[in-house]
Image (cartoon, helix red, strand yellow):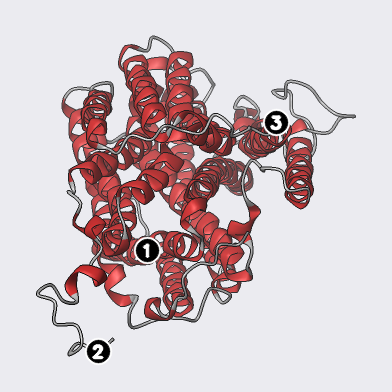
Amino acid sequence: MSAASSPSPSPSPSPTKDPEQGRSWVPMIGLFLAQVLMSFNVAALPISLGGMVEDFHVPPTTASSTIVVYGLAVAALVMTGAKLGQRIGWTLIFRGVLVVFAASSLLMIFSRTITWAIAGQLLAGAAAAIIVPALVALIAENYRGAQQATAVGSLGSARAFSGMSAFLIGGTLGTLVGWRPIFLITLALAVAVFALSFTLRSDRGDPTVKIDIIASVLIGAAIVMLTLGFNNLNGWGILRAEDTAPFSVLGMSPAPVLVVLGLISGQAFLLWTRRRMASDRVPLVDLRVLGSRSERSAVYAMFIIVAMEAAVNFTVPTYIQVVQGRAPFATSLAMMPFNLTVFVTATLIVRFYSRFSPRTIALFSFALTTIALVWLAAVVTNNWETLPTILGLIVFGIGQGSLVTLVFNVLVTSAPKRLAGDVGSLRGTTQNLASAVGTAVMGALLVTLLGVNVGRAVVDHTELPPELVSQVDLDNANFVSNAELEELLEGTTATTQQVDAAIEVNEAERLRTLKLGFLVLAGISAAAALPASRLPRYRPEEIPDPAPQD
């Protein structure tokens, strides 16, 4: 068995080297661009908010429904999409949904009303619900060893790269041409990925895979109710039903009722899935990907950081475009430090995996995001290009980029390869539900805080008499620019001095609300230290091979 007793001309290299590790990177280019396609679409939506508000004559919260609907569709359908991929075959279904994504881009380009745009994002979300698990499954099918680890890590950098390029390219197009041409890029990406999909290994699928319809309905209903409930807390009422609520439950707003029902449906899904696994039947998602405390903590950490990212990506563009009335290019410049930092950090963080444990990196990263958000709350002004504000966004981007890549790698490395689709669906559900909830809750929070702050401020300003205040509906206070406020006050008895006082109140309270919003996010970030402290303490070289877990 020694080298001396085996004088073959082809010694050790062949048994130790896996030929699969030398596979071409061309298929991965297609998968990378597929992640870019989805992430670019998501990042382009905040850039387009100002244009949609102007074109469709709707408030920002209505335009932001495109963001919510996309995340809602992905989160609600991704687990079912994973099973469809296993049944039909990942390559075939991957190509089919790329056609659907292309159709969604055409809807965005030619949309005549906000309903068209929402429908376009509904289609995009349904397509992404299959693309998300397909990416993980196709990487596992096409790459092995070190190539597979590199490929998985590239998805995080692709997501960050998309955000950076969307804000730069989208902001430029939005300023010079309009928001619609932004979606010509997603159309071109869908076509390019479709062409590159023919370099992927073809899999036949498994017609014997059964889709658990009951579990699909339970998880889909849970996510729909949770997202709709959170998204409408402000419009329908946090507790008491407002006039805008579609119905009431004994005088109570349907929004919190939907949240509670969504939580119940989610618990029912978990109970049903555990019972199905106990009887050796195939579940919609294998809960063994959440078998340990560290894996569950990774999911919690992923939800928190993605929700915070969505909140920041909603707040900053809305404030710059809608409140300040500035061009989309100004938004891209303001967000560039953040998105560039996320891209660089997501790419380079893997270099630290051999030196620090996931737990250490996560705790440090959440500390960075907390410090950054507190800093932003202290220094933010009506001018986003100030050095202190840019510094805060950069520090937040370092923490965010590190965390998204880290927690995804924790899940991938801890699960056996045959559960790659389940890991992908879990990632998609978590990220897109978090994105939808983060956007919805931040919008509701900011509008609620603004209404409270403005209501208190007008009482303190004697220049604004009760007779004038009664002519303005403060119960429906929303973020508006100074020009829009002037136009609104033209229909009242306000004098020039009173209009000036109202604008002063509007400017001061908008900024105060923004600062409070950052402080709330900082509190959430600090609380995330709890799940982060439960992440694995090992270094990558100490990770055992995932057990079959039969």
- What's the CA distance linking mark 2 and mark 1? 55 Å
Q: Are marks 2 and 3 in contact (CB under 8 Å)?
A: no
Instruction: From the image, tell me which residue sits under label 3.
Output: 217
- What's the CA distance linking mark 3 and mark 1? 37 Å
Task: Inspect the image, locate mark 1, and give the three-letter code of the amino acid beneath it.
Answer: Phe
Question: Is residue 228 shown above or below 133?
Answer: above
- Image coordinates of residue 97 in percent, x first then y, are 40, 25
Instruction: From the image, tell me which residue sits under label 2.
Output: 2
Say whether disc 2 or disc 3 marks the residue closer to the N-terminus: 2
Say whether disc 3 or disc 1 marks the residue closer to the N-terminus: 3
Task: Inspect the image, locate mark 2, and give the three-letter code of the amino acid beneath it.
Answer: Ser
Q: Nearer the viewer, mark 2 or mark 3?
A: 2
Which residue is the extreme one toward the right?
Answer: 250
Say whether disc 2 or disc 1 marks the residue closer to the N-terminus: 2
Q: Nearer the viewer, mark 3 or mark 1?
A: 3
Q: Nearer the viewer, mark 2 or mark 1?
A: 2
